[in-house]
């Protein structure tokens, strides 16, 4: 009996050690256990030292996840087709020149905050940022990037725990005492850059939408009932970080072609907001 | 020395020979004596002919010539030569003595004493030989002069404090004062440092018309042994607050070659710029370029100063003042960007903190959709790019981003060209896929204005090039305030080398002949192309900047967060763009400084909102005196030049006078302009403080007088006497008894005797 108890304890210790090791490994390698692939298995697109042209392009923040969120995929969430579809629409609906990888596929660069090339890309996006863990050097570089004039849009993080994680991490780059996070009013120019956005749309991931039968858009129940559009402004009052919390705007771009119903329900609002934010980032 | 020797040998002063007429007194006796002398000359020739065999032919010729010369002198004396001269009748003529009463006479360079001491010693003491000589011959009337001339009874009335020297005014005033009197001549005692801007010609014509000779006495040395002078500074009369100016100053010196001194620029005692300069050789001007920032608004007096050096004779000329009106305006610049791109965002951010620049951005986001940034009201640019001249010309600068020519109507393209040409605005075209040749500007009026030549046959096209270039200043760019991005030329050049590369998508364009290239870009193959060029076009200027992503100078990883290069570059560029751009009411004064009590002429150019000159406007100048009292001066169209109005007021107290001009037409305000003028005593007397010999010689030569220095003026009274002016009598002066005649006779005879002894013929 005693022997059996000792075996059980040993198994428990081993299991704990294995679990802890897995979490540690997962935390140390941003590509996670799935390698550096996009959400749908697309290869990453790392930028060269010098960009091939000076046209508008998005950069995806490659970060380290230090925790897990349900339905989240860390940095790769919505990459690369979320931004690629947005760039295509931006080039079609506005005069913006977009940097294309091929005739129909825009670039979607993947950059670490420690990469030199980050500073050639003044429009940075990130998803599932409720799992982000910034190292001190990453926090410092992000601060430098934003204060120089870079723009960051974080999206697709749901619920209180994700918000707390993200707000704590961004606070390491831009302390709240100096750069307060605010709910951005619908009167703000960012909602009227080109399209008239009259509400912050709550857009769910297509998987959740399908699973819920299209009845719910709140992926965390009551905790995420309301979509937020929050921001951090620089000393001149210009938004330099925008945060779409409790909503997955990028999925309305990424999955626009998968289901007409999903498209009509979410993509017009998602693109209106996306184009407005991109134009704001280009002009402010 | 020469004159004393001349007088000792020839008995009379040179002027007697210059004025006199040579005559011979031919009586029967003198003719007989002369004939005898000729006979003796013939005998001498025969005598030397007969002594063949003794001496060589050359010896005999020399001896014959010497003997002939002796007899020639004798014949000259026998003919009783006489000079007939016209000499002033003693005490029947007036001599006017004009004494310089200006500050420069205090400069201690006459035998180590102030120049005024010469006047006191030579013209102030009754026992002075010069005064005595003049008084014995003439009725002396003494005048002092600086800005004007006035009669004095005693030399003690001079205080040598006049802030100006006006030689022409002094001569003309004296001439009028002596009108109707018999005047033998005018004596002008001065250092010749004329501070007036009027030419001497008119005054000299009057003197020549009345045949008044002027005898000038130059006081002071022609070169100071040790002196540093701020020769001149070129400062704009009006600048925008916060402007970083590169001011050219010229420093001259004597006695300090090789020494390094510092030129400071002070604004109300605060140093706002400084530059060291190594002094070149004596008399060689040293050009100094000093960077100055004009931070305080209003009329500012910038003082350019070099500290007094050891042993300097004159220290007052170490500083020079310049009045600068620092405008605290917000200059409106319209920026039309044809496509959303980061260049617009970062350009706007670069100048966001500049309170004196307002960049109003019209951002085309889609076809017929615009975003307006920094507009003054909901109506501004509501209809897109301005469609009328009134609307466009309200801006002082215009930036065209990556927007194709096809986005404008033909009239709008002409309006843009007129914006530069007629309105005098600043146009800047930025590089981009839709600008320059790629934007289809070839053959348009805008292309005419641009400093780069676009082939008229070029049609709008997609970009065919993408070059990554390192930007650096040309020689002109190194010296230009807009492209100097660090303190000093060397630091600026070094900073340019460190900046990250930028890209161009426009095919390289050649600068037009009248354009100045300030920045060039060098690609990795070593090829160079123009990045920034500028040219004057009509009343305004046009700039071309071909880089499309200068935001790299802000964002690039190699640029520290606190680096201000990008901000500095664009602030300077846009300030340059609107620098000197006229308003609807442009006010100026004929000079930035007058003496207290002098009149000031105000000029104003008045145009309507379309910048067409207006000749029937109601124009009023409001003058605010230093004490706060105000005065209204109506201004009148001058009748010759369209839009030009003039008015005059007289200053009273010393200080700054503010001039504000309002113009209206049919009860509609056309605009308001302002200028400033200072009323204060000038320091001009201390600049170029050496004795100016050339104008004094000119005065003397053109009027028939003579130029003297203190060392040569002893015989001046005699010279005036024989000048032939005033009441004169004819006098005859014998020449046969001149010492030179006896010396020649004896000398020639001794020479003949000595030569004969030397060749063995005695």
Image: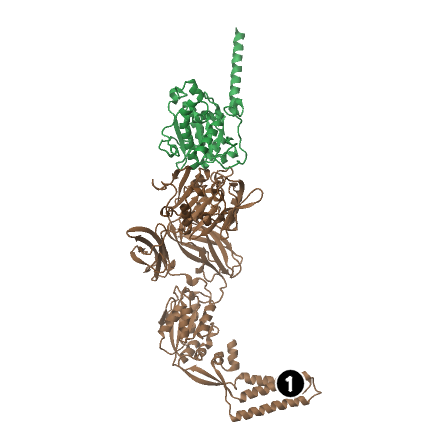
| Residue B266 location (% of width, % of height) | 42, 53
Q: Nearer the viewer, residue B626 or A46?
A: A46
| Residue A250 location (% of width, % of height) | 44, 27
Q: Residue at left 48%, top 83%? A: B21
- Residue situated furthest front in the rendering: B457
Q: Quadrant of residue B625?
A: bottom left
Chain A colour as displayed: green
Q: Tell me the quadrant of the picture where the C terminus of chain A can be found.
A: top left
Q: Nearer the viewer, residue B185 or B528?
A: B528
Please give the chain letter of the residue carrying mark 1.
B
The answer to whether residue B408 is above or below residue A221 is below
Type of colouring = by chain
- What element does badge 1 sit on? helix
| Residue B32 location (% of width, % of height) | 55, 93
Q: Nearer the viewer, residue B654 or B469?
A: B469
| Residue B377 location (% of width, % of height) | 34, 41
The answer to whether residue B151 is above or below residue B475 is below
- Residue situated furthest top in the rendering: A1
Q: Does residue A225 appear in the picture of this structure?
A: yes
- Residue situated furthest right in the rendering: B53
Q: Residues within 10 Å of mark 1 (few under 14, many from 20)?
A: many
The answer to whether residue B197 is above or below residue B747 is above
Q: Does residue A284 appear in the picture of this structure?
A: no
Number of marks in picture: 1
- Residue situated furthest left in the rendering: B667
The answer to whether residue B561 is above or below residue B155 is above
Say which chain is brown: B
The residue at which mark 1 appears reads as B63
């Amino acid at each position: 009996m005693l022997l059996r108890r000792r075996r059980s304890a040993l198994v428990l210790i081993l299991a704990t050690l294995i679990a802890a090791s897995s979490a540690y490994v997962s935390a140390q390698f941003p590509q996670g256990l799935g390698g550096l692939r996009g959400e749908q298995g697309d290869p990453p697109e790392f930028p060269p030292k010098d960009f091939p042209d000076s046209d508008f392009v998005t950069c995806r923040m490659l970060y380290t996840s230090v925790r897990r969120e349900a339905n989240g995929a860390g940095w790769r969430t919505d990459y690369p087709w979320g931004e690629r579809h947005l760039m295509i629409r931006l080039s079609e609906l506005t005069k913006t020149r977009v940097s294309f990888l091929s005739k129909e596929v825009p670039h979607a660069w993947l950059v670490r905050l420690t990469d030199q090339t980050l500073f050639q890309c003044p429009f940075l996006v990130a998803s599932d940022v409720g799992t982000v863990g910034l190292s001190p050097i990453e926090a410092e570089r992000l601060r430098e990037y934003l204060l120089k004039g870079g723009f960051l849009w974080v999206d697709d993080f749901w619920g209180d725990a994700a918000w707390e994680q993200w707000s704590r991490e961004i606070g390491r780059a831009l302390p709240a005492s100096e750069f307060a996070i605010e709910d951005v009013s619908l009167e703000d120019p960012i909602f009227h850059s080109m399209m008239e956005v009259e509400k912050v749309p709550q857009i769910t991931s297509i998987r959740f939408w399908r699973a819920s039968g299209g009845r719910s858009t709140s992926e965390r129940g009551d905790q995420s009932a309301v979509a937020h559009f929050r921001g951090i402004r620089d000393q001149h009052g210009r938004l330099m970080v925008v945060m779409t919390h409790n909503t997955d705007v990028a999925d309305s771009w990424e999955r626009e072609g998968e289901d007409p119903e999903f498209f009509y329900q979410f993509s017009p609002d998602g693109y209106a907001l996306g184009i407005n934010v991109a134009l704001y980032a280009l002009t402010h | 020395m020469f004159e004393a020797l001349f007088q000792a040998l020839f008995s009379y002063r040179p002027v007697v020979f210059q004025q006199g007429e040579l005559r011979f007194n031919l009586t029967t006796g003198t003719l007989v004596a002369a004939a005898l002398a000729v006979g003796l000359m013939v005998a001498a020739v025969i005598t030397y002919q007969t002594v063949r065999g003794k001496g060589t032919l050359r010896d005999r010729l020399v001896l014959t010539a010497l003997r002939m010369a002796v007899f020639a002198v004798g014949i000259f004396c026998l003919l009783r030569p006489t000079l007939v001269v016209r000499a002033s009748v003693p005490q029947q003529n007036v001599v006017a003595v004009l004494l310089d009463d200006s500050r420069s006479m205090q400069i201690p360079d006459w035998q180590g004493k102030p120049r005024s001491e010469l006047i006191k010693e030579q013209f102030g003491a009754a026992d002075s030989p010069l005064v005595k000589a003049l008084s014995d011959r003439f009725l002396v009337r003494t005048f002092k002069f600086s800005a004007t001339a006035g009669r004095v009874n005693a030399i003690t009335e001079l205080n040598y404090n006049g802030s100006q020297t006006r030689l022409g005014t002094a001569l003309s005033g004296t001439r009028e004062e002596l009108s109707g009197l018999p005047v033998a001549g005018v004596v002008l005692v001065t250092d010749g440092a004329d501070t007036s801007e009027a030419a001497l010609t008119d005054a000299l014509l009057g003197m020549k018309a009345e045949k008044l000779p002027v005898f000038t006495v130059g006081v002071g040395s022609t070169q100071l042994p040790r002196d540093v002078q701020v020769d001149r500074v070129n400062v704009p009369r009006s600048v925008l607050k916060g402007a970083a100016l590169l001011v050219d100053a010229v420093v001259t010196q004597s006695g300090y070659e090789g020494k390094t001194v510092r030129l400071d620029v002070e604004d109300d005692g605060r140093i706002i710029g400084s530059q060291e300069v190594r002094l070149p050789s004596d008399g060689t001007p040293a050009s100094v370029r000093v960077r100055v920032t004009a931070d305080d608004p209003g009329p500012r007096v910038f003082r350019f100063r070099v500290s007094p050096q050891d042993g300097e004779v004159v220290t007052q000329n170490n500083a020079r003042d310049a009045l600068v009106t620092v405008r605290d305006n917000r200059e409106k610049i319209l920026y039309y960007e044809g496509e959303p791109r980061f260049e617009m965002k970062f350009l706007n951010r670069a100048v966001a903190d500049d309170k004196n620049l307002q960049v109003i951005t019209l951002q085309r986001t889609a076809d017929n959709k615009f975003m307006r940034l920094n507009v003054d009201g909901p109506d501004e640019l509501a209809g897109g790019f301005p469609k009328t001249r009134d609307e466009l010309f309200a801006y002082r600068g215009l930036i065209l981003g990556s927007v194709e020519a096809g986005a404008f109507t033909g009239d709008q393209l002409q309006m843009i060209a007129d914006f530069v040409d007629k309105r005098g605005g600043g146009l800047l075209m930025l590089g981009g896929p839709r600008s320059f040749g790629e934007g289809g500007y070839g053959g348009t009026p805008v292309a005419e204005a641009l400093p780069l030549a676009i082939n008229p046959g070029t049609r709008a096209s997609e970009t065919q090039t993408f070059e990554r270039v390192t930007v650096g200043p040309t020689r002109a760019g190194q010296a230009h305030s807009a492209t100097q991005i660090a303190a000093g030329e060397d630091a600026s050049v070094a900073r340019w080398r460190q900046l990250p590369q930028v890209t161009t998508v426009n095919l390289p364009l050649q600068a037009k002949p009248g354009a100045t290239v300030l920045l060039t870009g060098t690609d990795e193959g070593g090829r160079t192309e123009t990045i920034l060029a500028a040219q004057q076009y009509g009343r305004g200027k046009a700039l071309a900047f071909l880089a499309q992503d200068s935001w790299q100078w802000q964002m690039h990883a190699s640029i520290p967060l606190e680096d201000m290069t990008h901000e500095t570059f664009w602030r300077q560029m846009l300030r340059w763009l609107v620098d000197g751009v006229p308003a609807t009411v442009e006010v100026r004064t004929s000079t930035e400084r007058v003496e207290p009590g002098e009149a000031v002429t105000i000029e104003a150019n008045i145009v309507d909102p379309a910048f067409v000159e207006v000749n029937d406007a109601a124009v009023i100048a409001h003058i605010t005196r230093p004490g706060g009292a105000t005065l209204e001066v109506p201004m009148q169209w001058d009748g010759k030049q369209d839009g030009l109005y003039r008015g005059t007021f007289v200053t009273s107290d010393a200080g700054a006078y503010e001039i504000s001009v309002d113009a209206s037409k049919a009860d509609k305000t056309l605009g308001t302009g302002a200028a400033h003028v200072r009323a204060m005593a000038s320091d001009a007397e201390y600049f170029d403080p050496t004795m100016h010999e050339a104008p004094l010689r000119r005065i003397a030569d053109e009027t028939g007088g003579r130029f003297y220095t203190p060392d040569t003026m002893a015989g001046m009274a005699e010279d005036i006497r024989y000048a032939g002016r005033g009441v004169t009598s004819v006098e005859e002066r014998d020449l046969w008894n001149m010492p030179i005649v006896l010396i020649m006779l004896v000398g020639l005879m001794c020479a003949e005797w000595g030569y004969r002894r030397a060749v063995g013929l005695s």
